[in-house]
Image (cartoon, rainbow, N blue to C red):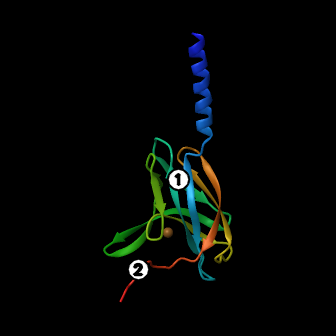
Amino acid sequence: MSKFLKRSAAVLSLLSVSMFALAEVTVESPYVRAVPPGQTNTAAFMQLKNSSAEAISLVSASSSIAENVELHNHINEDGVMKMRQVELISISANGNASLEPGGYHIMLIGLSKEIAAGDMVDLEVKFSDGSSQQLTVPVKKVMAHSHHHHH
Ligand SMILES: [Cu+2]
């Protein structure tokens, strides 16, 4: 191996090490929906950005304040919007996935305490590439339905 090739190989391996250390999925503007006292379920929403050249999926989530955490989607069944549990939420290569009211969301089931706007909730999200992220997510008031009528 020439001196030049040896050097290139060293630079390449350095590059791949530093690229591996970068988070491939970025979580942006996460929030948890505030719920009235007595309500034991809520949902978390966020934008997921995949900066890698391969599709990555959100595969699970957990939180210390919820007994169960599931990935859900909303589907329109005979004109009725229903929530369905899904195995994963896919984020395309160099793409985004939106978790938002009326669509994909992270369902927090069996809340162990009341949560109000302004509280912070811990949420761990796990991805198909084996990575996970510990998030601290603010609780916000969200309109139940985002239909706006103008008269
Ligand atoms: Cu749900």
Quadrant where the N terminus lies? top right
Residue extending farthest to the top is: 2
Q: Position of residue 53 (x, y in %)?
A: 46, 41
**Nearer to the camera, 58 or 135:** 135
Q: Are marks 1 and 2 in contact (CB under 8 Å)?
A: no
**Nearer to the camera, 46 or 61:** 46
Q: Quadrant of residue 41?
A: bottom right
Q: Amino acid at mark 2?
A: His
Q: Amino acid at mark 1?
A: Val
Q: Position of residue 45 (x, y in %)?
A: 53, 65
Q: Position of residue 69 (x, y in %)?
A: 58, 63
What is the C-alpha distance between the residues marked 1 and 2? 30 Å
69 in relation to 21, above or below? below
Residue extending farthest to the bottom is: 151
Q: Residue at x 41, y 80 (%)?
A: 147
The response on whether ligand 1 sits within 8 Å of label 2 is: no
**Nearer to the camera, 69 or 47:** 47
Q: Residue at x 53, y 76 (%)?
A: 142
Q: Quadrant of residue 4?
A: top right
Label located before the other in sequence (1 or 2): 1
Q: Is residue 85 left or right of residue 150?
A: right
Q: Residue at x 59, y 69 (%)?
A: 32
Q: Which residue is mark 2?
A: 147
Q: Is residue 59 left or right of residue 78?
A: right
Q: Position of residue 130 (x, y in %)?
A: 58, 44
Label 2: how many Cα within 10 Å (few below 14, some 14–19, many 20+):
few
Residue 2: which numbered mark, if any? none
Q: In the structure shown, which secondary structural element does the residue marked by tag 1 occupy?
A: strand
Q: Residue at x 46, y 47 (%)?
A: 94
Q: In the structure shown, which secondary structural element does the residue marked by tag 2 occupy?
A: loop
Q: Which residue is mark 1?
A: 59
